[in-house]
Amino acid sequence: MTATTRGSPVGGNDSQGQGQAPDAQSQPPLPQNQTSSPNSSNENSPVSPPDEQGQVDRPPQLEEEEPAFPHTDLAKLDDMINRPRWVVPVLPKGELEVLLEAAIDLSKKGLDVKCEACQRFFRDGLTISFTKILTDEAVSGWKFEIHRCIINNTHRLVELCVAKLSQDWFPLLELLAMATNPHCKFHIYNGTRPSETVPAGAQLPDDELFARPPDPRSPKGWLVDLINKFGNLNGFQILHDRFMSGQALNVQIIAALIKPFGQCYEFLTLHTVKKYFLPVIEMVPQFLENLTDEELKKEAKNEAKNDALSMIIKSLKNLASRVPGQEETVKNLEIFRLKMILRLLQISSFNGKMNALNEVNKVISSVSYYTHRHNPEEEEWLTAERMAEWIQQNHILSIVLRDSLHQPQYVEKLEKILRFVIKEKALTMQDLDNIWAAQAGKHEAIVKNVHDLLAKLAWDFSPEQLDHLFDCFKASWTNASKKQREKLLELIRRLAEDDKDGVMAHKVLNLLWNLAHSDDVPVDIMDQALNAHIKILDYSCSQDRDTQKIQWIDRFIEELRTNDKWVIPALKQIREICSLFGEAPQNLRKKRPIYIQTNLVGQTQRSPHVFYRHDLINQLQHNHALVTLVAENLSAYMETMRQLSKEEQAEFDPQTVRPGSRYSHVQEVQERLNFLRFLLKDGQLWLCAPQAKQIWKCLAENAVFLCDREACFKWYSKLMGDEPDLDPDINKDFFENNVLQLDPSLLTENGMKCFERFFKAVNCREGKLVAKRRAYMMDDLELIGLDYLWRVVIQGSDDIANRAIDLLKEIYTNLGPKLQVNQVEIHEDFIQSCFDRLKASYDTLCVLDGDKDSINCARQEAIRCV
């Protein structure tokens, strides 16, 4: 937006473009280059002051008639200041001057309140105009003549303010504060202008002046002249009398009246402060202290966001500081301010408390600012240490924590106070208890806000405070509901986010592990705690994050060794952490026996970016013999279950969780098997003979439940898949001494599949079968396991026997190159073998007498041979 301020055009109307007054603008001037002095503008102005328009000669007004006011000028002003390229007419006899003089005249006669147009001018045109010409960035682009016109109009504004001073007109008091603000753009830009009321070098006594320049290098003489103008118009006496009367005073009025002079206090003479303001400094605290709780509540409600109380105290302090020996007064004002804040906190509703919290944070900001200043002459009584002590002694945190915690903006202000208390090392363990108790059992919104608050603050807690907070978590965990535990887990996980040095993450990881260890924790909550544990390890920003993961794996392995109840969670965590490491490229993958020895710790230190998952698993295998450990654990578990099943009279369901356990028997077995397969597959390890036989024996040979053997069959079938995990060198021995020793009648469909995979793998390795595409050709009649296969045909269930028969057909109808030439003889021998087995069954039937079951069994064998 182009911000332009110019005098009104001279001539009869806007279309006359001659003799135009100088433009002042923040951007290059509009294409209007003719200028004239303020005097020539006076002669040609189309608008005269009100007294030159013949108003005095008009007949007397009736009471109900609205007083005369320059409506045309008001309309023009409103139009000019509200354009995108706004214009404020400040030249002599321009619209702003005309309206100001008309408003002064009406105000002195007490008629302004009867003139709606004048009231509208106060609210809109006057406020907008002076806001622009005193505070806009465009100020620095205007010419001296324009600045002179602005200060002249500001003198008229001061005259208007004095005329209305006893009537508490807020818009005018705000403008007075703007006009007397040494830091507004206009006064900063004109900081070197000399004063006309206090000429440089003049030795004028204080009692003859109301203001004088405090710094000759930047005298801000025009501001000094404004203040003296205010005093010469009896403004300070009116102000003093207004306070001393005490009539209809309230916090808002006091703030509005005192603010202008709390800002420009450095310019006031000592005589002015002593005569007009010291009585006010004494009177205002007494007035405020005498307010009843109800009156104070009402004031707090009306205060909204303008921080009136803070403004009053600050202004009174500034004024008192001008008088030597008033240090005690300044101290008492600070104490009074804190006392009022405490009252507001104790009695107020939400809005009042919000304002009180704003005041607390303003004090905190000021004491923090003072702490960073090093000028001993400006030492303040209220230091950061004293403020922290006040907060503690008056239990401010406890008061704030009582209610309104469902409001995010309320909690935001509480956060600022807590940060200050933490910074000053004044946060006690009791404070932490109170913060945590404030959300216990409360509405979800309160829980969320307090948890968010703690997540932000935790990084600033000392180690002792953090430990105490974690103790609070543990205490709540014991009796918390499922939903409360979920919320607590989320908070705990958040505490470790963005941890660069690993200290917070280390504490949180330990806490999660300890919480998950609680005996009464349901499995789903425990799983959530362990998932959070994994996420923290995964998202860790610590430089030694891989070492941290390995340390936790070592800890889980210790659990595996020592705590039977924690085997399954420990296995899950080890697997999840290992999965956080990337897989190696295909060219680096190679199966290794589980007893391989490798020093990967040194390797990780040299090049951690190539520490792959299989490297980690191999390191664990080397350090802990992990496969052996889990296999032995499975065997020991099965032995325990075997003893339990003997001791208990009624059989229990393996799918059901037993009392005192978190997992069913099926889960206990399956999780161990899944973990073992993960180690073999992802660690690129071979399962060796001792562990293979141990697992087979405890699950297949000595199964407690049918599901144990079934799980064993499935597991070994997967091990013997397209990418086998069983050491090929032990296949034959394991097949002959374990698989073929199992009673054929115990084979199920999965058992038959397991047998078939071993049968084909072993005979292929021995060269007795030849793999061709998806089929196998027999190249040697002496197949390993063939006799067992016939036993399955004869002794197995119908479905299993049919699978065995199909396998016999497959191998005898797919002869390899060596046997092709003897195909007829081989088939004849096969048929003869069938007859021999059939005859044996027939002979058995003949000798049996009366044993119905035996007869049926022999008959079944005969039918299968046929």
Image (spheres, grey):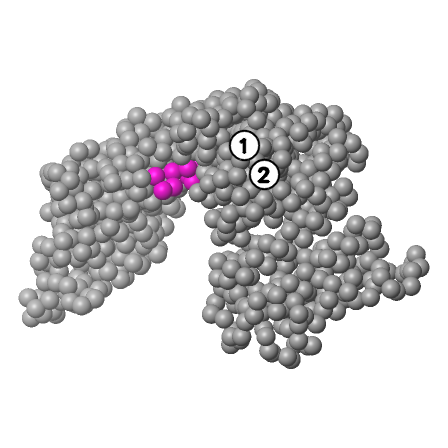
Residue occupying image coordinates x 67% and y 52%: 157
Q: Is residue 24 magenta?
A: no
On residue 506, the disc is none
**Mark 2 against mark 1, which lies toward the viewer?**
2
Q: Looking at the picture, tell me which residue is in the foreground, 127 or 323.
A: 323
Question: Where 582 sits versus 544, above or below?
Answer: below
Instruction: Look at mark 2 in the image and give the residue it sits on.
Output: 211
Q: Amino acid at mark 2?
A: Ala
Q: Would residue 140 be found to the left or right of residue 769 on screen?
A: right
Indicate the quadrant where residue 607 lies: top left
On residue 363, the disc is 1
Q: Is residue 188 visible?
A: no
Q: Where residue 358 appears, x then y in whole percent?
A: 59, 37
In the orientation shown, which residue stands out farthest toward the bottom?
A: 15
Q: Secondary structure at mark 1?
A: helix
Q: Looking at the picture, tell me which residue is in the foreground, 57 or 159.
A: 57
Q: Would residue 318 be found to the left or right of residue 621 on screen?
A: right
Q: Is residue 496 magenta?
A: yes
**Residue interval drawn in magenta:** 492-499
Q: Secondary structure at mark 2?
A: loop
Residue occupying image coordinates x 49% and y 30%: 367
Q: Amino acid at mark 1?
A: Val
How many angstroms separate mark 2 from mark 1 (CA)? Answer: 29 Å
Number of numbered tags placed on the structure image: 2
Indicate the quadrant where residue 146 lies: bottom right
Q: Where residue 545 appears, x then y in whole percent?
A: 26, 40
Q: Where residue 501 appears, x then y in whole percent?
A: 30, 36
Q: Is residue 55 visible?
A: yes
Residue occupying image coordinates x 20% and y 55%: 723
Q: Residues within 10 Å of mark 1 (few under 14, many from 20)?
A: many
Residue occupying image coordinates x 17% and y 33%: 623
The quarter in which the C terminus is drawn is bottom left
